[in-house]
Image (tube, grey):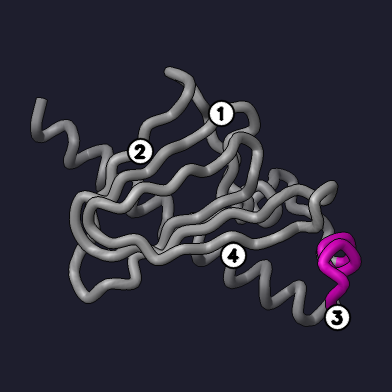
Amino acid sequence: MIHCRLFWTEILVVHQGTLFVGFVTSNQVGNRLFTKTLNMGDVFVFPEGFIHFQFNVGRSPAVAFAALSSQNPGVISIVNTVFGSNPPTNLNVLAKGFQLDPRVAMLMDLQAKILIMKYEIVCCYFISSMHLFK
């Protein structure tokens, strides 16, 4: 999930598997993309306020531990924020904002809604399975 934490730093330690991680700097420093492929024992720091991601690129499940510089860091999901607003953002606004043809924006909107639904299903499953261990 592409997301950001506005006021908190995150550190990630890979315990098992292989993750592709990265973040994008702000406009003031050129929107530069920093990425790295992490393996067991590797560590990566996501600076506060930057949009970042983690993606499993291995052939087996990955396990990583994250520590945050706040007990309640919050998260802003980029896809949910842009495509999951209520009421929905006008597709012409999205097309202009992303400098796309409106038909492409409509396709992106549909794809994002599918991703949001899948993400919500996974989160519900994870939360309900956590209750089994109480």
Mark 2 lies on residue: 66
Q: Alpha-carbon neighbours of circle 1 within 10 Å: few (<14), some, or many (≥20)?
A: some
Residue 111 position within the rendered picture, expressed as x and y whole percent measured from the top left: 58, 71
Give above or below for 65 relative to 27. Answer: above
Instruction: Name the amino acid, label 4.
Output: Ala
Mark 4 vs mark 1: give the one in front.
1
Mark 4 lies on residue: 112
Mark 3 lies on residue: 101
The circle drawn on residue 8 is 1
Residue 108 position within the rendered picture, expressed as x and y whole percent measured from the top left: 67, 72
Instruction: Name the amino acid, label 2.
Output: Ala
The span from disc 2 to disc 1 (Cα, nearest Å) is: 12 Å
The structure residue drawn at horizontal position 74% and vertical position 74%, both measured from the top left corner, is 106
Which is more N-terminal, label 1 or label 3?
A: 1
Residue 23 versus residue 73: which sits nearer the camera? 23
Q: Quadrant of residue 16?
A: bottom left
- Are circles 2 and 1 on residues that touch, CB within 8 Å? no
Q: Residue furthest top?
A: 71
Horizontally, is 3 left or right of 121 in the view?
Answer: right
The structure residue drawn at horizontal position 62% and vertical position 49%, both measured from the top left corner, is 51
Which is more N-terminal, label 1 or label 4?
A: 1
- Disc 3 is placed on an element classified as loop
The structure residue drawn at horizontal position 56% and vertical position 28%, both measured from the top left corner, is 8
